Every structure is written in C-alpha cells, then in structure tokens.
Image: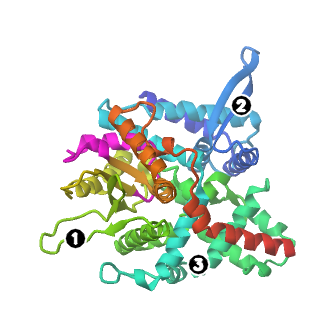
C-alpha cells in the first residue's frame, strides 16, 4: 500500500466516525461564525489538546484553516459517510477533522513530477480555488454578470445575430427553470441576506421563521422553495464526482435525514455561487446539447460590455475587424494613449472547476485545455498583429473575464508553451476588474496611469520575485465601475430592506 493509499484509508476512517448531516450543520455554523466575526476566509486560533494515552495537555498555537478546508471536509463526509451512523461533531472533533484533512491533503498533493510546467500548473490549481474564498468580491462580479444578462443582452444594438446565435437570457432562463430571471435573483439575494445574519443552517428553518407576508417582496414562500430545489443537490450528485469544488457551486445540500433538511454547507460558498448561478444554469443547458451557442454569444456580450466601459471613461479605442481577404485573426481592441498602444484580446471563458478534482490526471488535463484554448490562443493572436511606424510602447493584453490569481505564474506557463514574436515583458494577463480600474485612472489622471504602467513594465523586466501582477500595484484602488456605474446589487438590497422594514 502506497503512502497516498494509507492516507486515503486513514482519512476515510476518520470521516466515517461522524454523521454527515450533523457534520454539515456544525461546519456550516463555523463558516457563519467566521463571516460574522469578520475572519473571512482564513482563521487562526489556539487549540487546546489532550493526549488520552499519555494524559498530556497543552495548547497548539496558531492553528490555521481556510473555508476551503471546511468545504473539503463537508464534501468528503457526503462521499464517505452517511446520516445513519456515527456521532455528532463537537469542538474537539472539529479540529481533529481539520488536522486529519491537512494530513490527507499533504499526502494527496505529493508531486508526481518535477517538471517546471507541472510544478507551476500544480500551484495554479491550488491558488485559484483558495484565493476565491480569500478575495470574496461577489458583489462586483454579480453586478457585471447582471449587467451583461440584462442591459447588454436586451440592447438591440448588441444582438450580433450575424456573428453568433442571439440568446435572450431572461427568456431562456425561464424556459429552463420555469422561474422568472429577476424573481430568481431577488430570492437568491433574500436567502443570502437571511442566512448571513443567522446561525441556522437548515434553509427551511429560515423560511419557517419568516413572520411576515413575503408576497410584499414580490414572491411567495413557494417561489423560495422552487429556488432552493433548483440550486440544491442531494448526496448522490456529489458522490458521482471526485470534485469537492461542486460544494462551492452548489452549497445547498439536501440531506437524507428527514424531510426538508436542506443545509447551507458554507456561507462563503453560498456568496461565491450567487454571481454565476444563472450563467452555469444556462451554460450547462447548452453543454448538455453539445452546443457552443451560449459560450460564443456570451463572449460577444463580454466584448460589448468592455465597449461600454471604454465609452463610459471616454477612452480612445478602436474595434479591430478581421480582414476577409487575408483571413488573419486580429485582437479585439486597439486603445491608444499619449505614450502607449494597447492591443486587447478578450477571453470570457471561466476558470474550469475541474482543476481541483481529486484525480490528478483529470485536473491537469483540464488546466492544460484552459491554457491552450484561452491564454495561449489569445497571445498567439495578439502577437500575429503587427504595429509599425510608431514611437509609442505597444503592450499586448489578454483580458480575462475571471480573475486568474498569481497571473505571473500563469504567464510563466504560457511562456514555456509558446514563442513570443514580441517582447514577452510587454505581453500581460489582465482581468476585467483590474482593467476597469486602469481605464478609470486613464480618464481621471493619465500621469498616474502612466506611472502605474511603467511600474508594471519594470516589474516584468526585473522579474520581481515579490509579484508582478496588477493586484499588487492597484491594491489601494476600488472597483468603481461595478460598484458605482452599474451597481445593480445595491438597488436589489435597498428594495429588499425597504420592504422588510415596512413589514
């Protein structure tokens, strides 16, 4: 038996000691307490210990865990235990399971190769799931998604029916779910509002505790139940997979213990799932039909979204068109300032959830596909487009819809997989959050904008070991476009709070 097989056996035995439903409830309350204590995604505590064999007592200083650890344990309990045997989780067993999970993870993450690309891909897999919990910016992401699914989608100038298949998102969502799009958003927001401030983990308890007529909010209790049913999954769904990430996307679990026992396994996961819920429902519908219509059209919507950003800040921009004669792929945009020319290629693909599966082979297959079809494809397209007769610095940007954490790490992988025809230090990965900040800076203070761009160039040229991404440089700046210009979330919350106050 290998070390990994021994670790697997020991971990499964540890998990099986506890009843799944009770474990999910305990870990759910732990996530809510962390959120309300403003500990967010990472918690550091001093934990008392007692060795029954020796009688030794003491304190483990600085024991730490992340919310992703809680999610992993919840998933593994669903996979390896059940609701009909075992004991309840208490404080001691909570930390015991966290420690066992760390041991198991360390064994599981033993590197199977020392190839540099493999090592960097390994790191990329880990950081993209953990940093989601640490950053926790679902409101900005929701505002962007909602704007695309409503304002962009309903703008007749953006139909683009000659390029791709136009999809009316609201109509399609109603067709798939039998729930109105805006009602779904309102109810999901209401569920989060109730869940974050309470210590109850069974979502049906939240519904039963409502002491007013929810019809005043624009929906009924039956509507709430319909949304819960749509967004929850039973044990069998998770057991079919080796991907604990599924609890991040579907954090409401229907247990086997009694009727109407739907547990919100992690409050952070619930918040993270909120912005993309509609996206995945529609995307999965088309994926099951082996159709790319949704992803193709969503990419066009992302382009039109950026067009609105550029117009909002009065940026000098040009939408580049492909030459029908030469049939050469070109970047999406050319943005010109006094000192720079930016070529921008947009990529709307979301980071694959399968990059944190238990099966390593599948994990690296998915991340390889993502790099090949998204980042490398973008940089090849950017580097095939030449700009001559200019004294300005030309910078090529792969603009991603989703934040790719440790983008310098991702850039390293890209650099090992392709040859750059242009200066690789002037080829950047930038996410839409960062790009919106840059465009606002360019509009308000071009001198400051130039300083930041030059700082980024210097970091790339010197290969700064402390980090080269824009997140480091733009740490003190806010996402004003999604929080002010298109702040749909606050309007929804204000509506709910006003109605709740009246009730």
Magenta span includes 414: yes
Residue displayed at 71% across by 31% down: 45
Label 1 vs label 2, nearer the camera: 1
Residue displayed at 47% across by 73% down: 282
Magenta span includes 208: no
Q: Is residue 261 visible?
A: no
What is the quadrant of the C terminus in the image? bottom right
What whole-number distance in Å separates the C-alpha atoms at marks 2 and 3? 42 Å
- In this picture, which residue range is highlighted in magenta? 400-426
Which residue is at the front of the view, 285 or 419? 419
Contact between marks 2 and 3 (CB within 8 A): the answer is no
> Where does the image place residue 102, in percent across and percent down from the top left?
56, 32
Q: Which residue is mark 1?
A: 322
Q: Is residue 143 visible?
A: yes
> Where does the image place residue 374, in percent across and percent down from the top left?
32, 56
The answer to whether residue 216 is above or below residue 5 is below
Q: Which residue is mark 2?
A: 45
Contact between marks 1 and 2 (CB within 8 A): the answer is no
Which residue is at the front of the view, 441 or 495? 441
Which residue is at the front of the view, 451 or 101? 451
Label 3 crowding class (10 Å Cα cut-off): few <14, some 14-19, many 20+? some
Q: Which residue is mark 3?
A: 181
User: With 400 as the anchor, is 57 left or right in this view?
Assistant: right
């Amino acid at each position: 038996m290998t070390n990994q097989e021994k670790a697997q056996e020991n971990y499964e035995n540890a998990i099986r000691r506890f009843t799944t439903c009770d474990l999910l409830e305990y870990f759910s309350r732990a996530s809510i307490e962390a959120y309300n204590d403003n500990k967010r995604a990472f918690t550091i505590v001093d934990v008392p210990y007692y060795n029954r064999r020796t009688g030794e007592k003491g304190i483990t200083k600085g024991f730490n865990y992340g919310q992703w650890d809680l999610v992993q344990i919840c998933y593994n309990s669903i996979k390896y235990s059940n609701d009909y045997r075992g004991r309840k989780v208490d404080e001691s067993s909570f930390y015991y399971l966290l420690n066992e999970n760390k041991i198991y993870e360390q064994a599981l993450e033993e590197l199977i190769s020392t190839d540099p690309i493999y090592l960097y891909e390994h790191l990329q897999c880990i950081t993209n799931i953990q940093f989601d919990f640490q950053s926790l910016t679902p409101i900005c992401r929701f505002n962007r998604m909602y704007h695309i699914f409503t304002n962009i989608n309903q703008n007749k100038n953006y139909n683009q029916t000659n390029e791709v298949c136009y999809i009316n998102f609201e109509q399609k969502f109603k067709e798939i779910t039998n729930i109105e799009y805006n009602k779904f958003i309102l109810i999901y927001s209401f569920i989060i509002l109730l869940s974050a401030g309470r210590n109850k983990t069974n979502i049906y308890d939240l519904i039963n505790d409502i002491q007013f007529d929810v019809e005043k909010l624009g929906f009924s209790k039956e509507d709430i139940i319909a949304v819960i049913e749509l967004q929850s999954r039973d044990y069998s769904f998770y057991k079919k997979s080796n991907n604990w990430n599924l609890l991040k996307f579907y954090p409401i679990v229907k247990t086997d213990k009694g009727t109407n026992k739907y547990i919100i396994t992690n409050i952070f996961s619930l918040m993270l799932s909120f912005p993309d819920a509609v996206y995945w429902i529609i995307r999965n519908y088309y994926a099951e039909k082996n159709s790319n219509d949704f992803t193709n059209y969503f990419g066009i919507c992302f382009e039109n979204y950026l067009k609105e950003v550029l117009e909002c800040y009065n940026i000098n921009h040009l939408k580049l068109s492909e030459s029908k004669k030469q049939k050469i792929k070109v970047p999406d945009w050319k943005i010109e300032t006094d000192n720079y020319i930016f070529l921008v290629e947009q990529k709307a693909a979301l980071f694959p959830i399968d990059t944190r599966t238990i099966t390593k082979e599948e994990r690296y297959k998915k991340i390889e596909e993502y790099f090949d079809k998204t980042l490398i494809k973008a940089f090849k397209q950017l580097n095939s487009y030449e700009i001559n007769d200019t004294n300005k610095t030309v910078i090529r940007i792969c603009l991603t819809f989703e934040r790719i954490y440790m983008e310098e790490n991702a850039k390293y992988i890209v650099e090992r997989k392709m040859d750059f025809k242009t200066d690789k230090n002037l080829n950047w990965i930038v996410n839409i959050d960062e790009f919106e900040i840059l465009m606002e800076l360019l509009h308000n203070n071009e001198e400051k904008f130039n300083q930041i761009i030059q700082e980024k160039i210097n970091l790339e040229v010197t290969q700064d070991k402390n980090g080269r991404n824009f997140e480091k440089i733009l740490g003190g700046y806010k996402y004003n476009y999604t929080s002010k210009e298109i702040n749909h979330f606050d309007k929804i919350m204000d509506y709910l709070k006003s109605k709740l106050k009246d009730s």
